[in-house]
Amino acid sequence: MTLHLKKALFRNCVFNSIVCAALAAILIPLLGAPGGMLWPAILVVGVGLATFLRTASRIRQGLLSRVQELASYVHIDRASAQARKQVDWSLIDDYATQLATRGFRPLGDYTTYPSAPTLAGVAAMFTDAEGSMIIEIQQLKLMPEAGKTDGIYFSIMSMVGGSIRVVTSNHKPMAVTYMMRGEHDVATARPGSGLMELLATHTDLLMRLREKVGKAPSTGLTVERYLLAIREAQAQARSRLSAMSGYAIACAVDRFDAERLLRWTPQIADLKDVPQRRLEELDNGFGSDIQPPIFHESLATQF
């Protein structure tokens, strides 16, 4: 759904200004206007400006709030009654069998923390023998009040050169996801694509990045490092969004919706300049004791 945030900004501004002008037109004949028409004009302009700034601030704060809660997971016990009831494990296991024939192994089943009030979701996670890819098989179940159907989605992540996060998924690209991207993210969306098609796309992208950027996919990825990479992207997005005004954010969101981007990436020259690092540096930077826990022991969830 296209948001048209800029239109909303100006629409609210104009509407409140008109209401203010109408009230002034009613009150001036009754109360008089000692200063002539100057003060009503100033009041109308002031109300419009205040509305514009307040709406822009809400847009900015709404997006910033999305990156304040650092990514965390909760492990799901498949044997629990709720998990058996809410999740179609046979469907996930069918995909797991396909991955096993290609050398992937399971890393466990998880859900996000905190859970969304209208969404029950589980992610079965897998990695290849070298730990150069993390694959999520995501089964999402929206609550009845959300008015939508269940769905299976896939997301594949690699870290090229230890710093460039490469993500391929079959989710419909959203402006919020784009605005919350990391500084070095290379993201590709293929809505409606199957798991094997996405895997082929992701593998081909890694090969092309290796040729053009001169950096290989890092090995040794784990669920912990997967989440730490998300937290790093959240920190980068938070820094970028904090420096933007609400109006600038509205313009960026509208531009994304207008262009309907399916892929976003920095320039190749910029990716070449990104320093290579070992994944241990990611551990040290975003896995310290002062950070919120990566995994939570329990969760009031649908599972």
Image (tube, grey):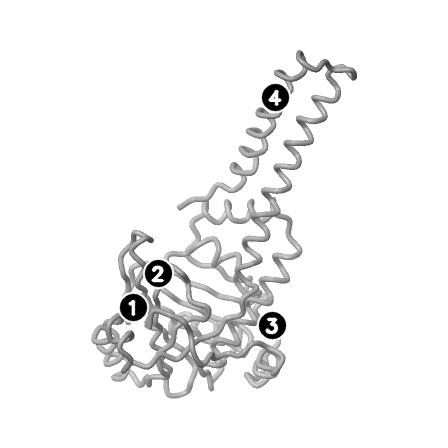
- The Cα–Cα distance between marks 1 and 2, rounded to whole angstroms, is 9 Å
Q: Amino acid at mark 2?
A: Arg
Q: Secondary structure at mark 4?
A: helix
Label number found at residue 23: 4
Q: Quadrant of residue 123?
A: bottom left
Residue 65 appears in the picture as rendered: yes
> Mark 1 packing: few (<14 Cα in 10 Å), some, or many (20+)?
few
Foreground disc of the pair 2, 3:
2
Please say if the residues under marks 1 and 2 sit with CB atoms less than 8 Å apart.
Answer: yes
Residue at left offset 64%, top offset 20%: 24
- The Cα–Cα distance between marks 4 and 2, rounded to whole angstroms, is 52 Å
Q: Which residue is mark 2?
A: 190
- The Cα–Cα distance between marks 2 and 3, rounded to whole angstroms, is 26 Å
In the rendering, at what x and y percent does residue 188 appear?
A: 42, 63
Q: Amino acid at mark 4?
A: Leu
Residue 200 appears in the picture as rendered: no
Label number found at residue 197: 1
Residue at left offset 35%, top offset 60%: 190
Q: Quadrant of residue 105?
A: bottom left
Is residue 240 toward the left or the right of residue 125 in the image? right
Label number found at residue 274: 3
Sequence-first tag of 2 and 3: 2
Q: Residue furthest top?
A: 29
Q: Secondary structure at mark 2?
A: loop
Foreground disc of the pair 4, 2:
4
Q: Secondary structure at mark 3?
A: loop
> Mark 4 packing: few (<14 Cα in 10 Å), some, or many (20+)?
few
Give 84 or 28, whichever is nearer the viewer: 28
In the rendering, at what x and y percent does residue 284 appear?
A: 61, 83
Q: Residue furthest right?
A: 35
Sequence-first tag of 1 and 2: 2
